[in-house]
Image: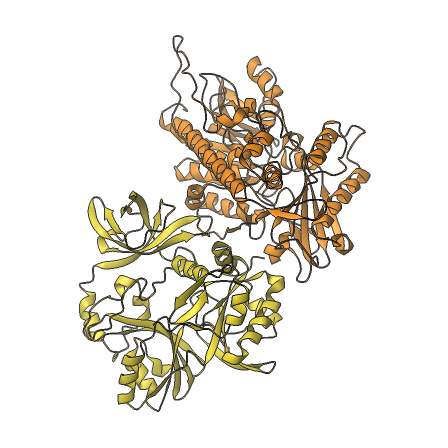
Chain colours: A orange, B yellow
Amino acid sequence: MRYDACVIGAGADGLTAAVALARAGLKTIVIERNSQVGGRCSTREFHPGFRASPFCDELPSIPPPLYWSLGLAQRGVLFVPAPAMLVDRDGIAIRLSGDARRLLAEAAQLRQAALARAAAEAAKPPARRSFFSRPAPARPWPGEAWSERALSDLLGERVADSRAAALVSAVALCGRAADSSLAGSALNLLAPAMDGSGVPMGGLAALAAALEGAARGAGAEISCGLEVTDMRRNGGRIAGVGLADGTQIEARAVVSTLDMKRTFLSLFQWNELAPAVAKQAAGFRMGGGTARVLIALQSPPAQAPGPERFVYFVSGGQAESSAALSACQAGTIPEAPPAAVRLVSAGDPRLAPIGAATLTVTLGCIPFRLFDGAWTKEKRDVLQARALVAADAVMPGVGTRVLAAQVIAPPDFEDALGRSEGDLAGGDITPDQMFAMRPFVEPGGPPPPRTPVDGLYLAGPSSAAGPLGACVSGAVAATAVIADIGAGRLK
Amino acid sequence: MMDVRATPFHARTAVLNPGNAWTSRNGFTLATAYGDRDAEALAARTTAAMADISWRWRLRLEGERAGEFLSRLCTKNVAALSPGVALKALWLSDGGGVRGAGAVARLGPAAFTLYASAPDREWIGSAAARVGVAVRDVSDEDGGIALIGPYAAQILKAAGLDPALEPLSFRRMSWRGLDILLSRFGEHGGYELWCQAEEATVVWDRMMRAGVPFALQPAGLAAMDVLDLEKGIVRPVRDYEPARTGFAAGPTPASLGLERLIDAGHMPFNGRAAWLAARERETQRLIGLALESQDDLPNAILLAGGQAAGHTLACGFSPALRRTVALAQVHAGFAEPGTEFTLVSPAGPVPGRGTELPFLPDSGQIPP
C-alpha cells in the first residue's frame, strides 16, 4: 500500500492533518491504535445513562479560521462557553475581573501570533544546507517575552485582585503540576489547559465525529484498530510505517501525533537515530499531573454559587497550591489538590438522564508514579474522596447524591491515549521546551514541525503548535508536508 | 412621540433583564439580551431557547371572501388551505416589489390570521374592505413565545403539551385551564405558543419550569437576530424598504432571496404580471458573506475584482460559526459561492468570501 502521507493517530490533530492533506490532493491514510477515532476527544457512558468525556471536558480553542475551514459548525459541532469562577474552601465565589480579562485577551493575541508564525514557518520548505551555510539567528517567537516571567509575578503586576489572579492561574494550570513561581511559568498562559473556548454539545466525541466526516469527505482513509510499531526508512529518509500485524505502509511523509518520547523512543530502533536526537528525545520532560473523576448524580445539586453550567475552580490559596505541588513531587496524593468542578449535564442534557446530573472533577498535582506503589483501588478511592470534597465546596451536599463514580488516574491517560506519563500537554510547558524548541533545539535545523528525520513531521501535543490550540498542530504539519512535496523535497 | 408598549410577558422579561437592555420593535419594548447574546443564540442550536415574539404583527381577516381576497393578495393559493394549516408567502406591490412577507393561517372556513414582521395595516385593510372582508389587528390581544432548539419538543411534553405538529400547522387547545394556540410557523424549526395577554405570565412560568432539565434559556431580540442572520433571513426596514408605493418595482423577490415564497403557477396574485416581466431582467442576488473582520459592517459597498459588485445588508458575529457574517445583495455575475470580495469600510478594505445561504441549517434533532 503506497500513500503520499500517513498520519499516526486519529485524534483531533491527526484528523485535521488528514483533512488538509486530502484536500490538497494527497493520498492520505490515518492509522489509529484504538477501535474508534478521537483520542482524548471521546465521550463515553460511564454509568447507565450517564455520559462524559473521560479525559477532558474542553480543549484549547480551535482558531476561528480553522474552525470555519473545517466546516465544524455545519457538521453540528457547536461550542458553548462555560465561564469560570473561583471558589475558595469557604464557598466564596469570584469571577474574572476586568484586568484579568485584559491579560487573558493579551495572551490570546500572543497565542494567535505564535500560531501564525508556526504556520508561516511550516509553509516555507527549508533551504538545503551546504557545508558553507550558516544558520540564521532565530528571531524570538511572539510571546517569548513571557518565557522569563513567573506566572505569579505576571499576575501580581497585572491583576489587582489576588483572588481574580488566582482564578487566572487556576484556569491556565488546570490539571497540571506546575509551579507558578518559577521563571517561565507564565508560558502556561500562552498554552493554557483551557481557555474558555467551551464544551462541544454531545461531548468531545462530537468533535471527533465531525473531523472524521470531514477527513473521509475529503478522501482520506482512516483505519482503526491498527498500531504503528516502527518507522520504515530508506537512505535515512522516512519511507513508511510498519504495523503490529506485519503490514507495511509506504508513504512519502509520515505525520506523527504521538508525543515526542513515544514517536522517537518507541517507533525507532535505538541505533536508527543520531545520538544527539535520541538524547534530546530522552531528555524531553513530560509534565502531567492530571486525574479526573466522573460522577453520576441521582439529582442535580440544590445550589451552586453561580449558573450551574459554569466551571468552578476550587482553590485554598497559595499555601494550599504549594503544598499540593510538593506532595505531587514527593509522589503522594495531595490533601487538597487544585480542582475544577463542572456540572457538564447542566449545559448539555444529553449527558445525563432527565432529572439526574453528570459532574466531572479535574484534579491537578496528581503524581503519575506514587512513591509507595501502584495506583490501587484504595488510592483511586482516595482520589474520588478528594474530588467529592472539592465538589462539596462548590455545591454543598453533592456527596449525598452520588450514584456512581469513575476515577481516571494519570496512568490511565497513558494506557488509553498513549500519552507518556499521562501528560495531555505533550511535555512540560517550560522555556526550553516551547515554540521552536518543540520538538528539537537545533539552530539552523529544519523548522518545526519538521524533524531531523527527513519525511517525518511532528503534530500533536509535543509539536511547536501543539499546546497553543486544538487541531492547529495537525493543520501546521499538513502545511509543511504540502510545502515540502511541492518543493520536491519528498520523492 | 413614539408609542412604545410592553408585551404581555414584560413582567417576566423585566426580571430576567438586569442589564436593562431593551429594544423597540413594531412599537413593543423587548429585552435585547438577558445576559450573554451569544450564549442565548447558541442555546437555540444546542438545547433550547425561549423568546418573546409578541412584537410580530398579527392581522385577523374574516368574511366569506377572506380566502379569495388573501389569494389575490398573496403569492400562493391561500384559498386552498385547510383549517389548521398555514403557508408562507409574499405580498407584492402592483409593480412587483416586495411589500411584505409572512405566514397565513386558516382558522376556519372564513377566518384567517396573517403573521408578519412588519405591519401593513392600512393598505391591506382598505383593500379588504372593498370586498367585504373584516380585518382586525390582534397584535395587542394576545402574546406569543417561540420555543426553539433540539429540546423544544421534549420541553413541551414535559409541560404537558403534545408536540406532535407538522411544520406550518397549528392547533388550538386547552392547557390546564388556559386556552392556547400551538403553532409551527417560525423560521427556526421550533414551536410558538400564543395565549391571551392576561394569561401570558402563567404560560411563561410553566414553560420555564418545564425547561429546567433541558437547559432552556430565555433569548433576547439580539440572539433571535443572530439566528435570522445565520438562516439568511432578510427583515423589512433593517434590510430593505418595503415597496409601499403602488407601482414600486423593487425590491424584487429575487434580490431578497424570497422567490421560494412565490408559486409561479398561482394565477391571480397582485403584482404577478410585473414580477414575471421583471424576472427576466433581474440582476441582483442575495448571498452570504464570510468576513475577515471583528466588526459589524452592514450597508457597506462590495468590490469584486476592482468592480462595484453590491453591498452588505445585515451583518454580525455568529457565535456558532465563530465568524462575522453578512447578507449581501450582489450582481448575479458575482453570486457564485467562493467569489472573493473586498468590503469598503472606514477602517480600510476588509476581505470577504461569498457563501451559500443559509450559513447554517436549523438546530435539528438531538444526537443519539
Image quarter where the C terminus of chain B lies is bottom right
Residue A402, above or below B249: above
Residue at 59 percent across and 50 percent down: it is A203
The image shows residue B193 at horizontal and vertical percentages of 50, 74
Residue at 18 percent across and 73 percent down: it is B247
The image shows residue A193 at horizontal and vertical percentages of 58, 38
Residue at 38 percent across and 49 percent down: it is B324
Left or right placement of residue A398 versus residue B240 in this view: right
Left or right placement of residue A341 versus residue B340 in this view: right
The image shows residue B52 at horizontal and vertical percentages of 48, 69
Q: Nearer the viewer, residue A312 or A291?
A: A312
Determine which quarter of the picture holds residue B74: bottom left
Residue A188, above or below B367: above
Q: Nearer the viewer, residue A455 or A230?
A: A455
Residue B187, above or below A439: below
Image quarter where the N terminus of chain B lies is bottom left
The image shows residue B229 at horizontal and vertical percentages of 38, 58
Q: Is residue A1 visible?
A: no
Residue B331, above or below A180: below
Determine which quarter of the picture holds residue A22: top left
Q: Is residue A132 visible?
A: yes
Residue at 27 percent across and 84 percent down: it is B126
Q: How many marks?
A: 0
Q: Nearer the viewer, residue A474 or B300?
A: B300
